[in-house]
Amino acid sequence: MQPVQDAGAAAGVPAVGETAPDFELVNQYGEPVRLSELRGRNVVVVFYPFAFSGICTGELCEIRDNLALFEDENATVLALSVDSKFTLRAYAEKEGYGFDLLADFWPHGDVASQYGVFDPGSGMALRGTFIIDADGIIRYVVVNPRGQARDLAGYRAALSELGGN
């Protein structure tokens, strides 16, 4: 599996082979979600700039429309932005997302910072994706430049190499 990492990504992006930084955030319903509690499953952590923005909506709708791909590979999708849980709930309801949207709202961008994908100049997360295996090890990293959507084929290839565990 060839990880792809944008050279312009923020410093401190965890590398393939490292243990994923643990975090706990609330989802769009205010329920806590802790990464370490998902051990035993693959996890796809998708950072995106803002709810209701064009490219972000396109990317998340593509995940929504292909959710079976993730489920078939024993993978849980967690989509993170710096929006509040209230914004994320409205967004999830409008778009029909069947996966957790997590609010990295306060402290603002803290988890995105742990993953090296927070842009303090704009106050938003970059388009970073981390695929984490069932043991909590990062197996795939991609950080796309601003304005460039991620490719679902990359997720598919990385997940198929991990297998359903």
Image (cartoon, rainbow, N blue to C red):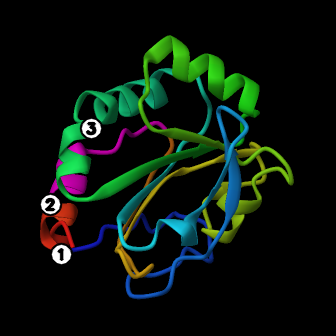
Pointer 3 or 2: first along the chain: 3
Is residue 52 in view from this perspective? no
| Magenta region, residue range | 147-156
| Helix, strand or loop under label 1 | loop
Q: Residue at x 60, y 68 (%)?
A: 115
| Residue at numbered disc 2 | 157
Nearer-N-terminus badge (2/1): 1
Is residue 150 found left or right of 99 in the rendered image?
Answer: left
Query: Dot 3 corresponds to which residue?
Result: 67
Disc 3 or disc 2, which is closer to the eye? 3
Marks 2 and 1 in Cβ contact (< 8 Å) = yes
Pointer 1: what residue? 1
Three-letter code, disc 2: Ala
Which secondary structure lies at badge 3?
Answer: helix
Provide the secondary structure element on which disc 2 rests.
Answer: helix
Task: Mark 3: give few (<14), some (14-19) or many (20+) Cα within 10 Å.
Answer: some
Residue at position x 47%, y 31% in the image: 56
The label number, if any, that marks residue 161 in the structure image: none
Measuring from the top left, give residue 154's x and y in whole percent: 22, 55
Label 2 to label 1: alpha-carbon separation: 8 Å
Q: Position of residue 147 (x, y in %)?
A: 46, 36
